[in-house]
């Protein structure tokens, strides 16, 4: 490695344990702790103590044993974030079976692919709509047997099946599960567009869980820590935070809807927040729109400028100028306190991951009193490998390695990671495993640098992946190639890196467009500019986009597109000699169109008098 930095462990971690032991250790340490809270009927928050939740997990595990689930069997969960998801996940893994998470937004075709690749034998669906997806492809999934619906009493049903299974039988199965055993297969988009299953062991999770606790004691170990988790548990980052919470002194609040997040903040009062950049962008935009355009809007705009200036001065290490400090103190009392109140009034830190965080958003929140500690990770490493410390954090970096984790930069500038959390491999793809993991180093596909203090800065990406502001990794090839099957489309290039949704820049083939118009009995067009404005042509492009969207989940689908009156050619630098679109060149060429038209910020509504 050209550069290398390792953060040593302060306390050894025994990773030859299973994931259930994390919950078991919390119960032994603090059985009456409020472990999980959730919103029940009527909007009231309900609580499981550590002991109660362990009993629930064991009851479910016994039911799975009674239903014939054996070590190595794959059990899928397709549902929103909930206590049921968490309980089933732990129960499945506690007896040596494998949890296979499925996003509730996945299409039936994606469900079929995942079920067959991991040989899913049993599935838990949240509701009838999710069950219908499974039933649509059941005849093509040879291994699948039982399908249970959470909203139709699945938890009670499985627990009832387990009533005749004794504690000793459960613990015999649980004790047989070791750190090297496979715990889960998590599917993530690969460079070809086909989801790849990442094999994660019990030891992978155990190691990185306790590494995280040791690395972030202010967040995990102080008394009465509270985390409100609203990200989907199918995402390994959110799933990791469950175990992090159990290993610390954290009460985990579970919320299934981002629509109610502000009300949930007010009711739950978290001490720290986990989110993707899009969450913080939405909160900032909501505050801005609420301020409006009048006097209140001007005050908010000035407060934003002061917050960012204060943050930049703080980060510079040269001290805060007196006048800036006075202005900041004024806005802290009259503006920033209101913004902090949005989070419930108790929040101290926020951890942002899953996608790159825009520096202006980070400086804003840091300036109002909420440090956004940006981190970094991948499914292949059980989510996190780096995070900014609570003291001495540096905006613009992804922080320092967690304890026991090594970061390196190879001769090509690629960021590489080594730790006991690196995955076992890519399910059914030994060739990809050999390509991505060399001598224990996972090659991330990202370009970066490491300074002498261990702070890592990302500088680019090798992979042709789009990472939205919501943290969704989108491989564009499948949608692009589908859209280009239209007779009028020359090229289709997806954009959306660090943006709230996926969009497309589409060029036309003039000759083919006119040929298609003739076949439709419509008038031809003299040039690409008129072709781009032609309503018949636009309708055909929209049809092609809609068809392509059927192949992927909503988060991967194209929400907006723009037809440009220009060909992409090798001569203008937008195509390679093999006719592949150069995404970066095209994105920069149409930067103004992308920023000011496709992703134009919404103007706040003004009240008519």
Image (tube, grey):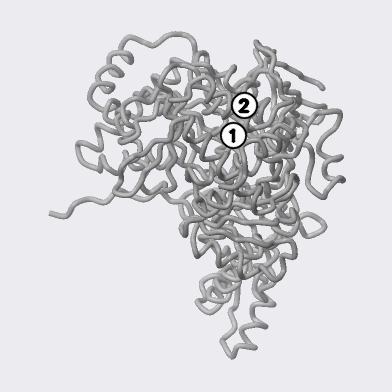
* Quarter of the C terminus within the rendering: bottom left
Q: Secondary structure at mark 1?
A: helix
Q: Position of residue 53 (x, y in %)?
A: 49, 36
Q: Position of residue 41 (x, y in %)?
A: 33, 49
Which disc is residue 364 wearing?
Answer: none
Residue contact at pointers 2 and 1, CB within 8 angstroms: yes
Q: Is residue 547 above or below residue 460?
A: below
Q: Is residue 136 above or below residue 147?
A: below
Q: Is residue 25 left or right of residue 313?
A: right
Q: Is residue 209 left or right of residue 352?
A: right
- Residue 438: quarter of image: top right
Which residue occupies 55% across, 57% down? 125
Q: Is residue 370 above or below residue 522?
A: above
Q: Nearer the viewer, residue 38 or 514?
A: 38
Q: Residues within 10 Å of mark 1 (few under 14, many from 20)?
A: some
Which disc is residue 240 wearing?
Answer: 1
Which residue occupies 50% across, 46% down? 84
Real-space Cα separation, disc 2 to disc 1, in angstroms: 7 Å
- Residue 401: quarter of image: top right
Q: Secondary structure at mark 2?
A: helix
Which disc is residue 209 wearing?
Answer: 2
**Mark earlier in primary sequence (2, 1):** 2
Q: Residues within 10 Å of mark 2 (few under 14, many from 20)?
A: many
Q: Nearer the viewer, residue 260 or 604?
A: 260
The residue sitting at the left extreme is 609
- Residue 296: quarter of image: top left
Q: Position of residue 364 (x, y in %)?
A: 40, 28
Q: Nearer the viewer, residue 537 or 208?
A: 208
Which residue occupies 72% across, 65% down? 141
Visible residue check, residue 355: no
Q: Is residue 355 above or below residue 489?
A: above
Q: Is residue 101 left or right of residue 113?
A: left
């Amino acid at each position: 490695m050209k550069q290398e930095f390792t953060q040593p462990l302060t306390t050894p971690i025994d990773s030859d344990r299973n994931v259930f032991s994390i919950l078991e250790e919390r119960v032994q340490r603090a059985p009456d702790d409020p472990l999980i809270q959730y919103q029940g009927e009527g909007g009231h928050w309900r609580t499981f103590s550590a002991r109660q939740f362990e009993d629930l997990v064991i009851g479910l595990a016994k039911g799975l044993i009674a239903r014939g689930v054996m070590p190595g069997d794959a059990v899928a969960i397709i549902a929103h974030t909930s206590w049921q998801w968490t309980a089933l996940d732990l129960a499945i893994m506690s007896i040596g079976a494998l949890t296979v998470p499925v996003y509730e937004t996945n299409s039936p075709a994606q469900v079929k692919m995942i079920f067959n690749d991991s040989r899913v034998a049993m599935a838990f669906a949240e509701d009838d709509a999710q069950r219908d997806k499974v039933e649509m492809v059941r005849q093509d999934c040879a291994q699948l047997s039982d399908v249970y619906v959470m909203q139709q009493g699945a938890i009670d049903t499985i627990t009832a099946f387990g009533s005749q299974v004794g504690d000793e039988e459960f613990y015999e199965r649980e004790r047989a599960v070791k750190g090297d055993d496979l715990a889960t297969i998590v599917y993530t988009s690969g460079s070809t567009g086909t989801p790849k299953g990442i094999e994660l062991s019990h030891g992978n999770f155990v190691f990185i869980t306790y590494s995280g606790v040791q690395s972030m004691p202010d967040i995990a170990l102080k008394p009465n820590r509270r985390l409100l988790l609203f990200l989907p548990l199918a995402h390994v980052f959110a799933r990791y935070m469950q175990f992090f919470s159990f290993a610390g002194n954290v009460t985990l609040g579970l919320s299934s809807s981002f629509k109610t997040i502000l009300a949930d903040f007010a009711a739950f009062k978290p001490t720290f927040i986990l989110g993707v950049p899009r969450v913080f962008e939405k909160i900032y935009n909501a505050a801005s729109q609420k301020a409006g355009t009048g006097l209140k809007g001007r005050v908010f705009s000035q407060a934003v400028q002061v917050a960012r200036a204060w943050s930049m001065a703080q980060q510079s290490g040269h001290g805060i100028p007196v006048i800036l400090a006075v202005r900041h103190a004024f806005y802290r009392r009259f503006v920033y306190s209101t913004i902090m109140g949005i989070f419930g009034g108790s929040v101290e830190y926020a951890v942002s991951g899953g996608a790159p965080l825009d520096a202006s958003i980070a400086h804003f929140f840091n300036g109002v009193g909420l440090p956004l500690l940006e981190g970094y990770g991948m499914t292949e490493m059980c989510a996190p490998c780096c995070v900014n410390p609570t003291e001495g954090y540096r905006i613009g970096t992804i922080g320092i390695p967690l304890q026991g984790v090594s970061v390196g930069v190879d001769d090509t500038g690629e960021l590489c990671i080594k730790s006991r959390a690196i995955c076992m491999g890519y399910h059914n793809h030994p060739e990809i495993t050999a390509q991505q993991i060399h001598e224990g180093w996972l090659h991330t596909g990202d370009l970066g640098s490491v300074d002498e203090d261990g702070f890592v800065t990302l500088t680019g990406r090798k992979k042709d992946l789009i990472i939205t502001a919501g943290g969704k990794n989108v491989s564009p090839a499948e949608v692009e190639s589908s859209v280009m099957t239209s007779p009028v489309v020359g090229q289709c290039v997806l954009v959306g890196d660090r943006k709230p949704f996926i969009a497309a820049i589409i060029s036309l083939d003039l000759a083919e467009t006119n040929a298609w118009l003739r076949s439709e009995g419509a008038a031809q067009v003299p040039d690409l500019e008129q072709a781009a404005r032609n309503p018949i042509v636009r309708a055909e492009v929209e049809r092609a986009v809609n068809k392509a969207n059927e192949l992927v989940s909503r988060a991967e689908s194209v929400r907006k597109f723009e037809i440009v009156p220009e060909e992409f050619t090798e001569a203008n630098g937008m195509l390679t000699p093999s006719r592949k679109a150069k995404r970066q060149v095209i994105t920069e060429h149409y930067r103004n169109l992308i920023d000011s038209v496709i992703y134009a910020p919404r103007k706040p509504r003004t009240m008519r008098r």
